[in-house]
Amino acid sequence: MVMIPKVSIIIPFYNCAYVDQAIESALNQSYPSIEVIVVNDGSTMHLEKLEPYADRITILHKVNGGTATALNWGMDTASGTYTAWLSSDDLFLPEKISLQVEYMERNRIDLCFSDYLLITDAGTEWMWSVNESFEEIKGLKDVLSYRNPINGSTMLMKRTIFREAGFFEPKYRFTHDYDMWMRLMLKGYSFGYIHRPLIKYRTHPASGSMNHQADIRREMNDLQLLYREKRREED
């Protein structure tokens, strides 16, 4: 009998009105072996949206500490072979996990990301193709030195990575994902890319990426300097 690897989907949640839609998209995956873990990062609003799912998901509650701390607790609690991160205002497309697990098992890689659909509050959608910035996956190492082409909600990772390489760094409140991709690239983990959209990434006025541009830019500059220095040390 072929064993189907379990996938843990982690949803960090802080006062997000869309969290029920995110949970629905996780539970509606075509993949047969998943667990959904919602980490409430000290929310004071929209907690009632979790109640209908209480018997189908795991809900963890903590004091507010930022997305990285919520992700880390979720990843540490997870029992799956693979872990996925779903932002509470984004949506997984139904085949996301199935396509990524098949791709990763077939190619024996450690992480896999994809294109995504941008959606607005008005319902407009358009596709964001990630590989406009690199012709083949080995070019990603160079691209990371000046931008982050990877949307965290598109990523599927082996859970063992966190034990081996460390968890998300909380001091990078808005760019903990960028820091993680850089660290894993420098440590030699294998990245894979699926050239089709597997999630819907929501842009709206309350999103962190819209409201903290100056902080994001500062953190990115710091990370890019560190990454370039470490790459020079390798050469």
Image (cartoon, rainbow, N blue to C red):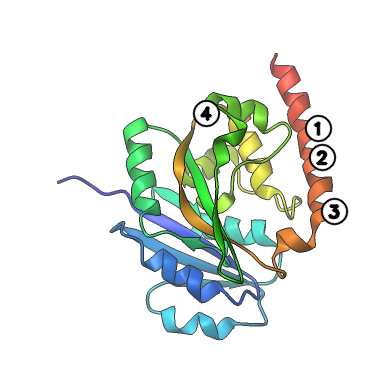
Q: Mark 4 or mark 1: which comes first in sequence?
A: 4
Q: Amino acid at mark 2?
A: Asn
Residue 79, position as x, y percentages in the image: 41, 55
Q: CA distance from mark 4 to mark 3?
A: 30 Å
Secondary structure at badge 4 equals helix
- Which-is-in-front pick, marks 4 and 1? 4
Q: CA distance from mark 2 to mark 3?
A: 11 Å
Residue 17, position as x, y percentages in the image: 60, 77
Camera sees residue 72: yes
**Mark 4 highlights which residue?**
137
Crowd around label 3: few <14 · some 14–19 · many ≥20 (10 Å): few
> Is residue 212 left or right of 128 when viewed as pictured?
right
Camera sees residue 158: no
Q: Mark 2 or mark 3: which comes first in sequence?
A: 3
Crowd around label 4: few <14 · some 14–19 · many ≥20 (10 Å): few
Q: CA distance from mark 4 to mark 1?
A: 22 Å
Secondary structure at badge 3 equals helix
Q: CA distance from mark 2 to mark 1?
A: 6 Å
Question: Residue 214's mark?
Answer: 3
Q: CA distance from mark 2 to mark 4?
A: 23 Å
Which residue sits at x=51%, y=40%?
161
**Mark 1 highlights which residue?**
225
Question: Residue 9's mark?
Answer: none
Which residue sits at x=53%, y=64%?
11
Q: Amino acid at mark 1?
A: Leu
> Is residue 210 left or right of 45 when viewed as pictured?
right
Residue placed most toward the observer, 218 or 234: 218
**Mark 2 highlights which residue?**
221
Crowd around label 1: few <14 · some 14–19 · many ≥20 (10 Å): few
Q: Mark 2 or mark 4: which comes first in sequence?
A: 4
